[in-house]
Image (cartoon, rainbow, N blue to C red):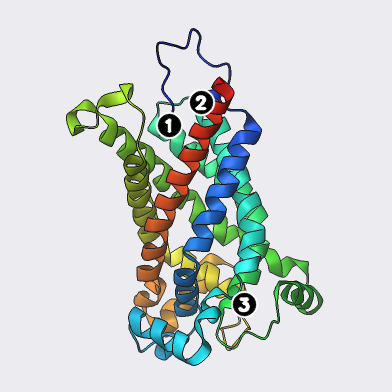
Amino acid sequence: MGFHPTSEIIAPPPIHDGLDFYQFMISGSIAGSIEHMAMFPIDTLKTRMQAIHSSLITTTLRQSLISIIKLEGPLSLYRGIAAMGLGAGPAHAVYFSVYESCKKLNPNNSMAHALSGVVATVASDAVITPMDVVKQRMQLKGSPYKGVVDCVRRVLIEEGFGAFYVSYRTTVVMNAPFTAVHFATYEGVKKGLMSPESGGGGGDKEESFVVHATAGAAAGALAAGLTTPLDVVKTQLQCQGVCGCEQFSSSSIKDVMKMIVKKDGYAGLMRGWIPRMLFHAPAAAICWSTYEAIKTFFQKLNGE
């Protein structure tokens, strides 16, 4: 992925893609952090749209953005970014390193890419879920928390450690198909763009930034749209009882979905789908192109 041997190389590299395990971790960590930081304001809009009752949502995405900036200031769009900064780096390091380790077993098979992505997301979600809980609670309008440390302390005291993982099952159930679709689409689109028939020149040329960005955007948008209902459930579970958000007696995905449908109809399960897709399309493009660029840097470094 992102590397093709040339005639100057006498023997194939002994390690997958010519990189060591720690280099995949560094590449993934940097790419994931840049992705989330760049798109954080859109993520804030999505969280607010999914967390509150639909009757409170009477404006368009553009109007919501203008309203937040006018009433709360532009910095309010970045509340919780420190929590994401603490979680995104380690989580993506785990995500990409596990993915690459699994993918190398059958690097040319789309099903292997999808299954590798599922294994990777189960591992990375265990790392990022607690910080995602903190991040989403701080993104809410009128959030009572002063900062990351204050949020962590209060959640531990008032709700216990389990509150940080109340949405873990939902997150895994959501991210397993999300990642399967995402990785399979990314590898498929990238392969298609690089094929001689598409004018990409085939596998004899290095993959370009445009190829990585286009494949990443397509993968991110498709996966995001298909898994929006589960993302709504995850947001509601993580924000329950805060700033007027619904409190649930059960963390069952089925029960939460029933409550959402009962109050908002089936449309309630698609709340925030526009900002979710607007987030994941460019975010995936940024993440994949950054990841592949750093991998290329390491490959050249290792070659030297």
Distance from the alpha carbon under mark 2 to that under mark 1? 8 Å
Disc 3 designates what residue? 138
Q: Seen in the image, is 41 located left or right of residue 206?
A: right
Compare marks 2 and 1 and give the one earlier in the sequence. 1
Q: Residue at x 27, y 25 (%)?
A: 202
Distance from the alpha carbon under mark 3 to that under mark 2? 39 Å
The quadrant where residue 196 appears:
top left
Q: Type of residue at label 1?
A: Gly
Regarding residue 255, the answer to whether it shows in the image is: no
Q: Nearer the viewer, mark 3 or mark 1?
A: 1
Relative to 160, is 121 above or below?
above
- Dot 1 falls on a residue whose secondary structure is loop
Badge 2 vs badge 1, beta-carbon distance below 8 Å: yes
In the image, 193 versus 206, the foreground residue is 206
In the image, 68 versus 265, the foreground residue is 68
Q: Type of residue at label 3?
A: Met
